[in-house]
Image (cartoon, rainbow, N blue to C red):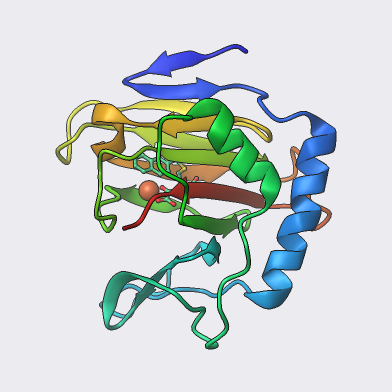
């Protein structure tokens, strides 16, 4: 399996075959029937452009009360199970890690983006994060463990997987833009990013 290392980010281009990507989209549609996408607001009340849901024991929530992991969707329903396809990818690529407790589901419309940030709401930052991209290409920016400084960007394509561990786990990162309509995977266009995480 081809692997590209950029600043400690381990990128596996085209990791998931097209048929597996389609099966994964079907599994996600089922997840989203239980736990629909929501548009989170920041603690200051600003709506994010990315729509979010989750699967697993915990989902990540942002609202006026702050950022945190919660065992239930805002509707009160428990999050659906993490699709098996994703658990298998986790076991293949990070076999030494604990089992993932959250699959964050991020949905990007054509104009959505995600500003540079660190992921630090998880209790054990020695555990990796694994990301799967589906649908339209996204320009992913990788920075440093402190804000600012030089960055490098890479286009993530449908089926690409990225593993963050070590220093990359604590690096600033973001999504600058989406390339509209360059993948046929999602009937309604856009991009889905899945991140598997250990939360506790
Ligand atoms: C580096 N998601 O959900 S995936 C996020 O495409 C997030 O939706 C982006 O940043 C997206 O927090 C980027 C790559 C990624 C995910 C999690 C990370 C990079 C990461 C956690 C720590 C360090
Ligand atoms: Fe992040």
What is the x, y in percent for residue 118? 27, 47
Instruction: Please provide percent x and percent y for residue 44.
Output: 26, 78
Left or right of residue 29, residue 162 in this image = left
Examine the image and state in which quarter residue 141 appears: top left
Near-viewer residue (41 or 110): 41
Name which residue lies at 61% across and 56% down.
82
Q: Residue furthest left?
A: 146
Q: Is residue 16 visible?
A: yes
95, above or below 124, in the image: above
Query: Which quadrant of the rendered structure holds the N terminus?
Result: top right
Name the residue located 41 percent from the left edge and 30 percent from the top edge: 96
Q: Quadrant of residue 163?
A: top left
Q: Residue sitting at 73 percent across and 74 percent down?
A: 33
Work out whether residue 191 or residue 36 is closer to the camera in this orientation and state it. Answer: 36
- Taking the view exactly as shown, the residue that stands out farthest to the bottom is 76
Residue at 25 percent across and 44 percent down: it is 125
Residue 178 is left or right of residue 129, and the answer is: right
Task: Estimate the x, y position of residue 43 in percent, counting from the top left.
Answer: 27, 76
Q: Is residue 185 visible?
A: no
- Position of residue 113 relative to residue 74, above or below, is above
Placement of 142 over or under 123, stated as above or below? above
Q: Percent x, y for residue 39? A: 51, 74
Judged left or right of residue 150, residue 17 is: right
Side of 101 where 68 appears, left or right: left
Q: Nearer the viewer, residue 160 or 76?
A: 76
């Amino acid at each position: 399996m081809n692997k590209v290392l950029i600043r400690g980010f381990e990128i596996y281009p085209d990791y998931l075959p097209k048929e597996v990507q389609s099966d994964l989209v079907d599994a996600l549609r089922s997840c989203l029937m239980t736990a629909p996408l929501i548009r989170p607001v920041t603690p200051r009340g600003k709506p994010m452009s990315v729509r979010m849901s989750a699967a697993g024991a915990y989902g990540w929530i942002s609202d006026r009360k702050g950022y945190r992991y919660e065992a239930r969707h805002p509707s009160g329903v428990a999050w659906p199970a993490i699709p098996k396809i994703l658990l298998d990818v986790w076991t293949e690529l990070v076999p030494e890690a604990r089992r993932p407790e959250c699959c964050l589901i991020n949905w990007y419309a054509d104009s959505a983006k995600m500003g540079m940030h660190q992921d630090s709401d998880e209790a054990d930052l020695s555990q990796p994060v694994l990301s799967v991209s589906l649908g339209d290409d996204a320009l992913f920016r990788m920075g440093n463990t402190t804000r600012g400084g030089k960055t490098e960007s890479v286009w993530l394509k449908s089926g690409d997987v990225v593993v963050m561990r070590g220093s990359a786990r604590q690096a600033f990162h973001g999504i600058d833009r989406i390339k509209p309509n360059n993948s046929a995977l999602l009937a309604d266009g856009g991009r889905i990013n899945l991140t598997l995480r250990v939360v506790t």
